[in-house]
Image: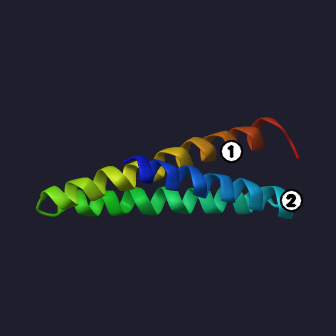
Amino acid sequence: MNKSLTLGIAISLISLITGFLTNNWFLAVKITGMTAIVSILLAGIFMGAPIRHQENKWIKNLVFIAIPNFILLTILISIRTFISF
């Protein structure tokens, strides 16, 4: 759980740094959005499979990867909506 959350935060930070260095914030939104959507979709696929202990652990890990990315995605979209670049 802790490693997954750290990985999600690292992906969020990498996307922020990429958006800042390239001055292309839409790229940061794409990176965080795709990471969040793919991890939630994979968690949903594993949820539909016959539940074993290992798959249940994967579901939790994928959700913990998606949480920081959804938070950053919400922040980036709200900044883009309310503040014009």
Q: Position of residue 22 (x, y in %)?
A: 84, 64
Residue at x-position 76% and y-position 57%: 17
Q: Residues within 10 Å of mark 1 (few under 14, many from 20)?
A: some
Can you name the residue that lies furthest to the top here? 82
**Circle 1: element type:** helix
Residue at x-position 24% and y-position 62%: 46
The answer to whether residue 31 is above or below residue 84 is below
Marks 2 and 1, how far apart in space? 15 Å
Residue type at mark 2 is Asn
**Mark with earlier residue (2, 1):** 2
Residue closest to the eye, 55 or 35: 55
Q: Position of residue 85 (x, y in %)?
A: 88, 47
Of discs 2 and 1, which sits in the foreground? 2
Residue closest to the eye, 48 or 2: 2
Q: Position of residue 3 (x, y in %)?
A: 43, 53
Which quadrant holds residue 31? bottom right
Q: How many labels does the image show?
A: 2
Say whether residue 45 is left or right of residue 23.
Answer: left
Give the label on residue 23, or none: 2
Give the label on residue 77, or none: 1
Tag 2 and tag 1, C-beta contact below 8 Å: no
**Circle 2: element type:** loop
Say whether residue 26 is left or right of residue 42.
Answer: right
Residue at x-position 66% and y-position 52%: 13
Residue type at mark 1 is Ile
Residue closest to the eye, 80 or 23: 23
Residue at x-position 62% and y-position 44%: 72
Q: Position of residue 37 (x, y in %)?
A: 47, 58
The answer to whether residue 55 is above or below residue 85 is below
